[in-house]
Amino acid sequence: MIDQDTINKITETARIEEVVGDFVTLKKRGSSLIGNCPFHNEKTPSFHVSVAKGIYKCFGCGKGGDSVHFIMDHEKYSYPEALKFLANKYNIEVEETVQSPQNIEAQNARESLYIVSEYAANYFANELWTGEDGRAIGLSYFKERGFREDILKKFQLGYSPDAWDALIQSAVGAGHKEEYLEKTGLAIRNDKGRLYDRFRGRVLFPIHNFTGRIIGFGGRTLKTDKNVPKYVNSPESDIYHKSNVLYGLFHAKKAIRDADNCYLVEGYADVLAVHQAGIENVVASSGTSLTTEQIRLIGRFSENVTILYDGDAAGIKASLRGLDMILEEGLNVKVVLFPDGHDPDSYMHHVGSGEFKKYIENNRKDFILYKASILLKEAGTDPIKRAGIIRDIVESIAKIPDDIKASVFIRECSGLLQVEERILLSELNKIRAAKFKKTSGGNQPQQSQYQQNPYQQDGPPDNLFENPGESAGPAEQVETADTNLIQEREIIRLLLAFGHELVTWDKIDNMYIGSFIIQNLADVTFEDEICKLIIDIYREEIENGHLPVASQFIKSGDRRIVDLAITLSTSPYSLSENWENRHNIYVRDESINLKATIFGGLYHLKKNKIGKMLTDITKELASETDPVNQEILMQRHMMIKGVERDISKYLGTVILK
């Protein structure tokens, strides 16, 4: 249990732009920072961070919150886990009544997988540096490969003894459970029920997640037996999904952002070698073919990818496969082809760090030049093969979502392939048309899942030809419900934005706008559940002598309140300073005349409520047969109608009936 003082210290210290900036590349726009949302796939940024308010909001998928909620959403952490993560980031000491790994395991099964993985990484590293076999076999192997000790320690490399259950015995002796060793894949149970180490007799490459926690391992055998697999990787688990992980990303993300470029290699050793050459912006798709999820991970930090693959035929084919996937995600691609027989690891050790860096700088090719040169070389002078290659290259260009980039590449291809530009453009349009027809099933494209209208109908409403005075059909009911929700949310927005300001009108002294609004809502019942809940909390706090502020609702334990508070406290739009500075267009700020702003919100809400009351009375009159009750209803109708006229007069609207 974390005490409240520590929680307050963590939330006050954590800077939203620093926390989010560790995971998303942010750029300045107006008063906000923007970037591509990490919670859904997008190519146009809709993810906003407000430094002043300490919150984030995606206007695409709707995710929003403060620093703690961001870590909870991104890392799938519980509230205490997110607090501990931020405490660790800002070196804040967290005192807990329960601290041992064994007790934490009992509380949280998922956290247990992280704990046992961390234990295993420390165990393997200790064996590499202090174990007799580890030093003689594992450390000697790495040094023979030319890796420096600082690189081995940086990536926490290790060695697993060539024994059936060395790790299991050590972990169980330290209080960890066999259950979690098995769930992480560190141990395997055979048909007879015996548990044994998965990685025995191998050097180990720990795999870190985005935040640096150990989630899996890659193990390389040092035996020459062909029946023994060269590499063994951790299986899928609750904390390790290989298609969503890039080896080395934790160590590379800052360098990728700084260099605005990501080097992509194939294996663990390639990452180590490139780091040893002084190039830190490098990751590997080790253990799996390149996936869309991995490409999107890179896209959070840079739009530029440089592929460093082997110079053999297999490496070339791998680079071509990955190239098209990267293009489809809107990233820019370059390729470095190493001399035949070399990969990044072998070439770096062959020529040294300095020459390796020079080679990369001098041999980067744009993907068009690279793919065309490779394929044209294979085709030779065969016209049929050359025609197929031209189509293949245009298909790659068709994957680029940016039309301007695609047109530039078409022009480059025209000269390179000696084919008229109009022919290539025609082929490009055919490919795109075929793709569109295939994805849309020959119909109009489906509406984005983030912009669906919940009230959209396939055809006209059933009551299209009914007398509108007889009954309120679905469309009218929806409109009324929408208007009511909008007005109720506007009151919440005003409370969050201006509730802490003092009333400056009608000679009212020492009253906050929040209290003024609440007093003027005594005759109003809120219908939306979350709006009503916020109003009730606000009213209760005022009655107890406290004035609520927006951050109180943003940090609420009720995620529904958090989501609404974030939504009402943010906007995807900001006015450019050029409107006034350059074009002399002045846009009125609602805070200039707070009386009009507050009264406008209150009166629009009450006008909407009164409109509903009048509709209800009209319905009662239509069904009431008792003359006395009809008279009472008529008087009520006239009285409420008079109130409506007064409100409408203030708002400047016209009542027609």
Image (cartoon, grey):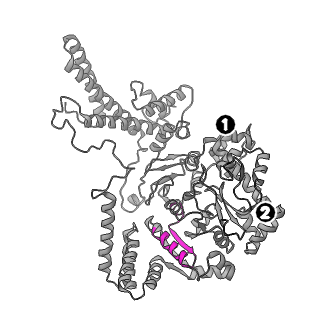
Residue sticking out furthest to the bottom: 381
The residue indicated by pointer 1 is: 4
Q: In the image, is residue 84 above or below residue 336?
A: above
Amino acid at dot 1: Gln
Instruction: Work out whether residue 379 or residue 264 is closer to the camera in this orientation and state it.
Output: 379
* Residue 141 seen in render: yes
Q: Which type of secondary structure does the marked residue at label 1 adopt?
A: helix
**Residue 483, how many percent across, how many down?**
33, 37
Amino acid at dot 2: Leu
* Left or right of 469, for residue 115: right
Quadrant location of the N terminus in the rendered image = top right
**Residue 552, how many percent across, how many down?**
55, 38
Q: Nearer the viewer, mark 2 or mark 1?
A: 2
Q: Which type of secondary structure does the marked residue at label 2 adopt?
A: helix
Q: Which residues are magenta?
A: 296-324
Circle 1 Cα neighbour tier, 10 Å, few/some/many (<14 / 14–19 / ≥20): few
Instruction: Work out whether residue 115 or residue 559 is closer to the camera in this orientation and state it.
Output: 115
Q: In the image, is residue 157 above or below residue 605?
A: below
Q: In the image, is residue 111 above or below residue 499?
A: below
Lower sequence index among marks 2 and 1: 1
Question: Going 50% across and 79% down the picture, which residue do you hit?
Answer: 365
Q: In the image, is residue 175 above or below residue 334?
A: above
Quadrant location of the C terminus in the rendered image = top left
* Left or right of 53, for residue 480: left
Disc 2 to disc 1, how far (Cα)?
A: 42 Å
Question: Going 56% across and 26% down the picture, which residue do you hit?
Answer: 544
**Residue 6, how many percent across, how many down?**
68, 41
Question: Going 59% across and 69% down the picture, which residue do you hit?
Answer: 266
Q: Which mark is residue 636?
A: none
Circle 2 Cα neighbour tier, 10 Å, few/some/many (<14 / 14–19 / ≥20): many
The residue indicated by pointer 2 is: 128
**Residue 567, how many percent across, how many down?**
45, 44
